């Protein structure tokens, strides 16, 4: 399912003294089946943008097309769009309310008016997709589960609607590192195995670099950058930092090795294996600058600077 946004503008309290432009003339296109990362500091407009993509919020100006259907037109019936564009909100487990995991996941499909057989089929499939064994978890209370498991139940409840687009707003917020990694692996699996378009909002630049094909960077309501993650990180590292954003840690390491240790290392590395190969290459080929420290020259490829590199 493709998404096309044209000149999208949203103004909170328009016409009042405290009016605030949360989205400012935002335009982009997302192709069917893409995996898109959405980043930006708090207040950049990410969450406001997300809530426009299935009609939860209406723009003051601009249009949104879902498969050429204008969801911003007047008197549009958005029911079909909301079936096909699913959103998992931040701290989605706060939306759990049923007595059992099975009933919570079944809530959406039940509201679609599906028969019991189809509902049961969808619940079992979505639980399998998020890595929850049906026999083990179906009759448990969602409130007895761990934070990561609750998050999986919430995601299962959305994908049980069979959306073609899955949007996740900070899906790992509040989880420990292990739970965060599990959720990111789950999202990648959902994208790879279910032929769906995924839009993932996250502050984790390292995970964005590993996961997504397309990166969107929001800043003060505007779409600052849109494109391939490697190129955006390579060309705009300083600009991203000025916007209060991080860059992948391996790229930070590569930049420090170039600046402080004289390594002639690539500046488009975005994962551990790439930076490791570059460091090994530089050492093997002696592709670095000898550095004078305390009147001594280090020539064996190992550098000990006061900066700790």
Image (cartoon, rainbow, N blue to C red):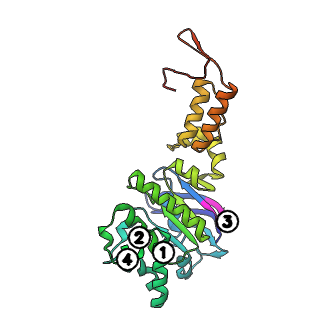
Q: Residue furthest top?
A: 295
Which numbered mark, 3 or 2, is in the foreground of this view?
A: 2
Sequence-first disc among 1 and 3: 3
Cβ atoms under marks 3 and 2 closer than 8 Å: no
Quarter of the image where one finds residue 248:
top right
Mark whose residue sits in front, 1 or 3: 1
Q: CA distance from mark 4 to mark 2?
A: 10 Å
Tell me the quarter of the picture where residue 211 sits: bottom right
The image's mark for residue 126 is 1
One can see residue 172 in this view: yes
Q: Which mark is residue 153?
A: 2
Work out how far the residue at label 1 is from the one at label 2, CA to CA, in angstroms. 9 Å
Of the numbered discs 3 and 4, the one sitting upstream in the chain is 3
Say which of 43 and 297 sits in front: 297
The mark that comes first in sequence, 1 or 2, is 1
Label 4 close to label 2 by CB (< 8 Å)? no
On screen, residue 37 above or below 190: above
Residue 54 vs residue 232, the one in the foreground: 232
Identify the residue shown where x is 64% and y is 76%.
Answer: 69
The disc, 3 or 2, on the residue closer to the chain's N-terminal end is 3
Return the disc, 4 or 2, that comes first in the chain's sequence.
4
Secondary element at tag 4: loop
Q: Secondary structure at mark 1?
A: helix
Tell me residue 304's x, y (percent).
52, 21
Q: Front-most of 210 and 202?
A: 210
Q: Tell whether position 208 is magenta.
A: no
Magenta-highlighted residues: 26-35
Give the numbered dot on residue 31.
Answer: 3
Q: Secondary structure at mark 3?
A: loop
């Amino acid at each position: 399912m493709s998404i096309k946004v044209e000149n999208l503008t949203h103004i909170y309290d328009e016409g009042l003294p405290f009016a605030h432009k949360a989205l400012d003339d935002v335009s982009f296109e997302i192709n069917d089946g893409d995996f898109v990362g959405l980043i930006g500091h708090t207040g950049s407009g990410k969450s406001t943008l997300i809530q426009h993509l299935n009609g939860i919020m209406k723009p003051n100006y601009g249009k949104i097309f879902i498969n050429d259907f204008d969801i911003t037109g007047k008197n549009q019936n958005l029911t079909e769009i909301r079936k096909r564009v699913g959103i998992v909100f931040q701290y989605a487990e706060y939306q759990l309310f049923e007595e059992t995991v099975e009933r919570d996941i079944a809530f959406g499909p039940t509201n679609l008016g599906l028969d019991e057989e189809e509902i049961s089929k969808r619940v079992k499939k979505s639980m399998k997709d998020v890595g929850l064994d049906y026999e083990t978890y179906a009759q448990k209370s969602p409130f007895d589960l761990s934070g990561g498991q609750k998050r999986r139940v919430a995601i299962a409840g959305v994908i049980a609607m069979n959306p073609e687009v899955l949007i996740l707003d900070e899906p790992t917020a509040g989880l420990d590192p292990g739970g965060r990694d599990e959720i990111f692996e789950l999202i990648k699996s959902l994208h790879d195995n279910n032929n769906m378009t995924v839009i993932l909002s996250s502050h984790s630049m390292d995970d964005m670099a590993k996961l997504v094909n397309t990166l969107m960077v929001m800043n003060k309501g505007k779409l600052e950058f849109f494109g391939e993650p490697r190129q955006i990180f390579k060309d705009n590292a300083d600009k991203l930092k000025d916007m209060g954003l991080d860059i992948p840690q391996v790229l930070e390491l590569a930049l420090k090795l170039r600046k402080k240790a004289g390594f002639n290392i690539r500046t488009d590395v975005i994962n551990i294996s790439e930076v490791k190969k570059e460091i090994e290459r530089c050492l093997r080929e002696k592709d670095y600058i000898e550095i004078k420290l305390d009147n001594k020259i280090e020539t064996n490829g190992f550098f000990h600077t006061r900066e700790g590199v």
